[in-house]
Amino acid sequence: MEPSTILLFVAALACPIGMGVMMWMMNKQMGGQSGHSSPGQRQSASSKERLAALRTQQQALEAEIAEVTRLAELEAQRDVLLANQTPSPGTDGVSRDKVATKQS
């Protein structure tokens, strides 16, 4: 076999072999971290923890929705007030900056 053929063959096998080694190492690490409890107990405990975490997340999202709703209401009120606001007497619709520059 020529060296270029061998190099191509090694390169073609490097990815699948490397992936297999990484999967084996990750599986080994995951298996080593588990406790001595049975799988059924571990799953029910993790289900309870997950449910508690989801409920906490739900409460946080509900609070955020209430806050955003309140902000939207306040912005709508502000827009209504700004739309109904009339210019103050003496300025005739001209801003104070324009009045000051006219007087100078």
Image (spheres, helix red, strand yellow):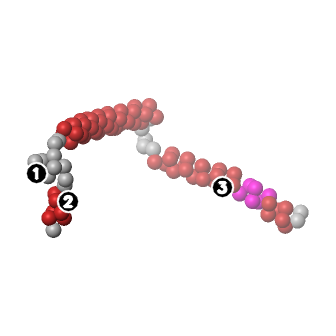
Characterize the local packing of mark 1: few (<14), some (14-19) or many (20 or more) Cα atoms within 10 angstroms: few
How far apart, in angstroms, are the residues tagged by discs 2 and 1? 13 Å
Q: Label 1: which residue?
A: 90
Q: Amino acid at mark 1?
A: Gly
Residue at (19, 49) in percent of width and height: 93
Secondary element at tag 1 = loop
Q: Quadrant of the C terminus?
A: bottom left
Q: Which residue is mark 3?
A: 18
Let me know if residue 60 is in the magenta part. no
Disc with the residue nearer the chain's start (1 vs 3)? 3
Name the amino acid, label 2.
Lys
The label nearer to you, 3 versus 2, is: 2
Q: Is residue 12 magenta?
A: yes
Asked whether residue 53 appears in the rendered view, the answer is yes
Residue range of the region highlighted in magenta in the rendering: 9-14
How packed mark 2 is, by other alpha carbons closer than 10 Å (few <14, some 14-19, many 20 or more), is: few
Q: Residue at x 75, y 59 (%)?
A: 11
The quarter of the displayed image where residue 79 is located = top left
* SS at circle 2: helix
User: Residue 72's x, y, as percent?
Assistant: 27, 38
